[in-house]
Image: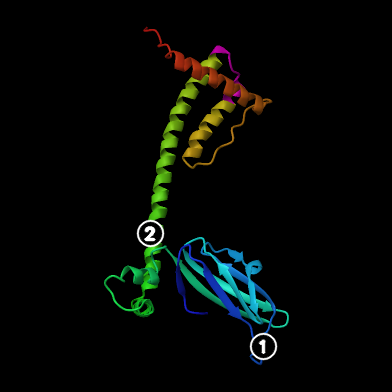
């Protein structure tokens, strides 16, 4: 496997290969190119391979994400062989070439000389390994931040669901007492109200069994209609208070 070459994100990468027979002569074959992207899946680029000359091929590939890429050329038919390698894609400003340009005002010499010196320093001081460690740390930070935000969202939804559940329970009792909704429909409605809170808290929903024949779809439709009417009445006027004894 060849040395790792780094490219800035968005820059095209030219992947080249040659195939030779046992005598060392360049030989054509049926060539495929597969690239394993940072997400771990394979990207088949065989249709984008250009046949430059006998036994010589290349593919212009533009990586979409930052990370390490592994590629594998395979030839079958007249010659059976495989060539593989890898490269790394960094952020648009994280490349030795970009660093050389950044230092051009204070550092003399040709760009080729600067790149050679920076490459030597990179190898001696493990720049790429340190970049990987930095990226991994930042990725963990982002994951922890997303998890904290998700937990905060779940908590807000759970508290809101609890308030809704409490109000719905009270309204369902009132409707049942007034004979405006049957016991079976009330049980179904109660279950759906409870499921809202359980889902928000990450708990599994439970099955509620009721006796007799229940048309769940009708119960849900009735619940929706009743809740819409209750919402309109609640918005128009406050719930009357119980008279003092």
For image coordinates 37% across by 61% down, the residue present is 137
User: Which structural element holds mark 2?
Assistant: helix
Marks 1 and 2 sit apart, C-alpha to C-alpha, by 47 Å
Is 77 inside the magenta-drawn segment? no
User: Which of the numbered marks, if any, corresponds to residue 138?
Assistant: 2
Quadrant of the rendered image containing residue 34: bottom right
For image coordinates 55% across by 73% down, the residue present is 15
Majority secondary structure of the magenta segment?
A: helix
Bin the neighbour count of mark 1 within 10 Å (Cα to Cα): few under 14, some 14-19, many 20 and up.
some
Q: Position of residue 40 (x, y in %)?
A: 54, 64
- Magenta stretch: give its range: 178-187
For image coordinates 48% across by 35% down, the residue present is 197
Residue named by callout 1: 21
User: Which structural element holds mark 1?
Assistant: loop
Q: Is residue 244 above or below residue 77?
A: above
Q: Position of residue 119 (x, y in %)?
A: 38, 78
């Amino acid at each position: 496997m060849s040395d790792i070459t780094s490219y800035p994100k968005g820059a095209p990468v030219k992947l080249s290969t040659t195939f030779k027979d046992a005598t060392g002569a360049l030989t054509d074959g049926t060539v495929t190119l597969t690239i394993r992207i940072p997400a771990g899946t394979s990207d088949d680029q065989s249709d984008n391979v250009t046949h430059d000359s006998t036994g010589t091929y290349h593919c212009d590939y533009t990586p979409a994400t930052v990370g390490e890429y592994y590629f594998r050329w395979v030839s079958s038919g007249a010659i059976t062989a495989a060539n593989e390698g890898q490269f790394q894609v960094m952020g648009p400003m994280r490349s030795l070439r970009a660093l050389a340009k950044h230092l051009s005002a204070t550092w003399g010499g040709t760009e080729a000389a600067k790149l050679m010196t920076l490459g030597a320093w990179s190898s001696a001081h493990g720049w790429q390994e340190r970049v990987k460690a930095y990226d991994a740390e930042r990725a963990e930070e982002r994951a922890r931040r997303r998890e904290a935000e998700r937990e905060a969202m779940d908590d807000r939804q759970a508290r809101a669901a609890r308030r809704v559940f409490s109000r719905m329970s009270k309204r369902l009792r009132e409707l049942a007492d007034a004979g405006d909704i049957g016991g079976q429909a009330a049980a179904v409605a109660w279950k759906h109200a409870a499921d809202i809170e359980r889902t928000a808290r990450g708990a599994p929903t439970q099955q509620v069994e009721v006796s007799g024949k229940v048309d769940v779809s009708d119960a849900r439709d009735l619940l929706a209609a009743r809740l819409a009417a209750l919402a309109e009445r609640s918005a128009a006027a406050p719930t009357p208070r119980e008279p003092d004894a």
